[in-house]
Image (cartoon, coloured by chain):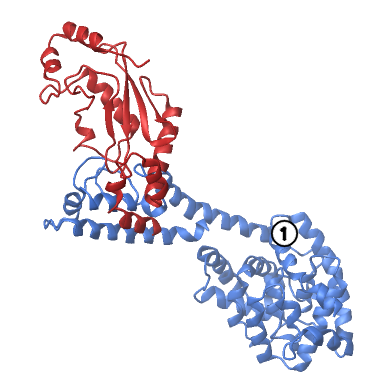
Amino acid sequence: MARGENQESQTGNVPAAAPGPKPASAGGGKGAEGQSVVRRLQSELMALMMGGDPGVSAFPEGDNIFNWVGTIAGSAGTPYEGTSYRLALAFTAEYPYKPPKVRFDTPCFHPNVDAHGNICLDILQDKWSSAYDVRTILLSIQSLLGEPNNDSPLNTQAAGLWANQEEFRKMVEKLYKPAA
Amino acid sequence: MGHSDAASPAPAPAARDARKKRGNRTAAKLKQSKLETRRGQWLNNSGQGNDGKDAKVAASPTGAGSNAGSPILASPHPPLPRRRVDSRSRGSDPEDREEAGATGLEVGGSDLDSPMHSPGSDKSQGSGCGTQRKGFSGNGHGPSPSSGSSVWSSSRSVSDAEEDTGSPEDENEVLDDWEAAADALYEDDSHCHHSSVPTTPPPAPTTAAPANAARPEAIRSKARAWAPDDKFRPQSLPSISKQASFPASIGNCWAGMGMSAAQQGILSLPVSCPICYEDLDPTDSSFLPCPCGFHLCLFCHKRILEADGRCPGCRKQYNTASAVEEGGGGAKGPTVGTGREMANIASVRLFRSCSMGPRY
């Protein structure tokens, strides 16, 4: 019952502290709430390291388990083949009930990714389910690369160019600046 | 004093030994043969010690006046002897108490070297058979007040009832079965005392038997189930095979009833909540809030109900799904969901209570 009480009592101040620059302290000071998030993230990390999904990987950035760096390899048969993209995942104390904030660190020419790396993906917004995890997020973004939703583009130029896969591929390579 | 002090901690190991002994037949046989001889020794001594002063002396320093025999009994199992003492003080006269002290003393003194002196003291209680049978039968037929192991006690009760079909005159024939039954039962000894008032005259021919009518079950219940009247018992009698068959049958019912159900119910489900990654307890594992079959723990379910109330597995609203399942069209929002949740919990509790006995 302590768990439930903690959840209830702390639901109020979670949003204030969660997006802060020091989520680790939030995790440490949040009691059961933060602990459960940390526990889940640690379990996910273990699963990712053990699972070895091809093309996706993720690891906490520094000592802060609330900020991860993910890597996605472009799938074969798509304009993104041979490229690799870094993403930043920022988890809140409400994870997994609320999705993490996911952003491309590596510039990505894609109909659903804007110039700042923001991603328009339903499962990262209204279609989020707490059953998703880092792995499924990265796999979803990986598949999004090859199957953009051109009906609600963030990058209209990319959306318009998608029909011409050769030109699109050239744009991808031109704008691709892999992390050192 | 020294004797009783030394003897007092011994019955507990002896009882434990006796329990382990079921699985160890050869050792049991060995010990029993030893005990046969000790029993003879004690019987000789008890006749003399009945009126001896030293018995009283030995008992009085440790014993609290009213129940001189208790110190030896009371020390190993503090909760149990209280009740025994009551029944004893009701039914016994001063001679009995003196002799109780003598009994304990003799047992402690002669069997100090052996952890198995408890059966020896047990045998010394000649009248134990009649009263013991009564106690056990009462336990078997009445509602068994067993706290944790209802299945165990019930399985024993069945065999016990079978044993009771034999009349006391058949003592020798029934003896083996009875012994096995009592041996398996004596773990529940704490439940037997209330019904063990010595109304039936004990058929045992031991000299000390009639006087000790109230006492035997106290000592016996701690020890292995020995036939009290060794005069009737052949030396080679101890049928340990039957005793050993009890744990086996218990194990069978354990495996048959409890574990299979528990395994089928629980082990096929996810071990941890997919949301918070905490381990699912049986309540969570049987908690199925959505027809899509997505399992999650109650905490996460509650949390999701407080938010958008959609099943993480299928994204459907929890309460609409539950409303459909309940057949009630009235979408009362979260209350429907929580009501169903409560129903689930209730059924889960039922399931757990059913499977509780065999598992623990």
Q: Colour of chain A?
A: red
Residue drawn at 16 percent across, 20 percent down: A111
Name the residue: 13% across, 23% down. A153
Drawn side of residue B239 relative to residue A109, left or right: right
- Quadrant of the rendered image containing residue B292: top left
Residue shown at 12% from the left, 21% from the top? A150
For residue A75, say whether it is visible: yes
Q: Residue furthest front?
A: A21
Mark 1, secondary structure of its residue: helix
Q: Is residue B54 left or right of residue B299?
A: right
The image quarter in which residue B13 lies: bottom right
Judging depth in this view, the residue of A58 and B139 nearest the camera is A58
Residue A61 image offset from top left, x and y in percent: 40, 30
Please give the name of the residue rendered at 63% of the width and 68% of the height, measured from the top-left corner. Answer: B187
Q: How many marks?
A: 1
Left-right relation of A35 to A83? right
Q: Residues within 10 Å of mark 1 (few under 14, many from 20)?
A: many
Quarter that holds the N terminus of chain B? bottom right
Which residue is label 1 attached to? B21
In this rendering, the answer to whether B279 lies above or below B146 is above
Q: Is residue B192 above or below residue B301?
A: below
Residue B269 percent location from the top left of the image:
38, 44
- Tell me the subunit letter for badge 1: B
Front position in the image: B288 or B88: B288
Chain B colour is blue
Q: Quarter of the image holding residue A75?
A: top left
